[in-house]
Amino acid sequence: MNNEQRANKVKKLLGLEESNFNDKNKYVRVADVLCDLKHYCNLNNIDIAEENRLADIYYDSENKEQPTVFSNIHFYKEYEIRQSSKSGRYFIYKDDVNLQGDDGYGDPYRSLEDAKTQIEHSEKRHHPIQATEWETYLMEVIKTGLTSPTPYKVIPYKNGIGIKKIELL
């Protein structure tokens, strides 16, 4: 199945049509579907952030034939921070290798400053704010787990405060 077939499958499944505006059982916008999926996940105790992360991985693997086009490239230390022209997100590259992904810096960044901050944090073994900020601590724990001689995956709680479980890879 190609990407156009996948998109048409979803359109047919969800009934995505602008003409459905007055039909409460049909979807008009993708945002409506995403909102309802979040409700579904909350009611069924499904980690929506993890599902989004996996969906991004699946999407990227299915989209290999359509390479990302970058609208801006910023140089920071020995890194390139490239901005996707499609999503507007920022990706960190070093020696022409994308450092995002399961064994890299994680999801693309929303701002150039976030990407620079991540580079700064990654260059320090233990960032001083790890003891007071869960997001920074979890980011470091996840990175450590993936680069460990015995790799493991750290799964945080939905609210981003604490570690829910650890799975060996």
Image (spheres, rainbow, N blue to C red):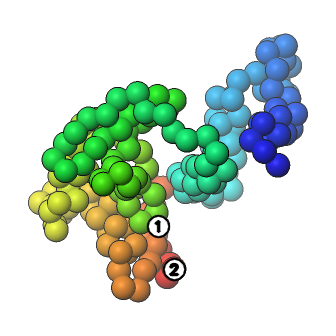
Q: Residues within 10 Å of mark 1 (few under 14, many from 20)?
A: some
- Residue 25's tag is none
In this rendering, position of residue 63 left or right of residue 151: right
Q: Nearer the viewer, residue 107 or 36?
A: 107
User: From where the camera sits, is residue 104 visible?
Assistant: yes
Dot placed on the residue nearer the N-terminal end, 1 or 2: 1
Q: Nearer the viewer, residue 109 or 27?
A: 109
Depth check, mark 1 against mark 2: the one in front is: 2
Compared to 73, does 39 lie above or below?
below
| Crowd class of label 2 (few under 14; some 14 to 19; many from 20; radius 10 Å) | few
Residue 169: x percent and y percent?
51, 80
Secondary structure type for disc 2: loop
Q: Nearer the viewer, residue 46 or 80?
A: 80
Tell me where residue 93 appears, x and y as whole percent.
33, 49
Mark on residue 155? 1
Residue assigned mark 2: 169
Please provide percent x and percent y for residue 55: 62, 51
Left of 12 or right of it: where is 127? left
Q: Residue at x 82, y 20 (%)?
A: 17
| Residue displayed at 43% across by 33% down | 70
In the rendered image, the residue lying farthest to the front is 95
Residue in the image at 64% along x and 45% along y: 65
Question: For the residue marked with disc 1, what is the amino acid?
Answer: Ile
Q: Please report the residue visible at 16 percent of the width from the left and 68 percent of the height from the top.
A: 125
Q: Quadrant of residue 73?
A: top left
- Identity, as a three-letter code, of the amino acid under mark 2: Leu
Q: Position of residue 15 (x, y in %)?
A: 85, 29
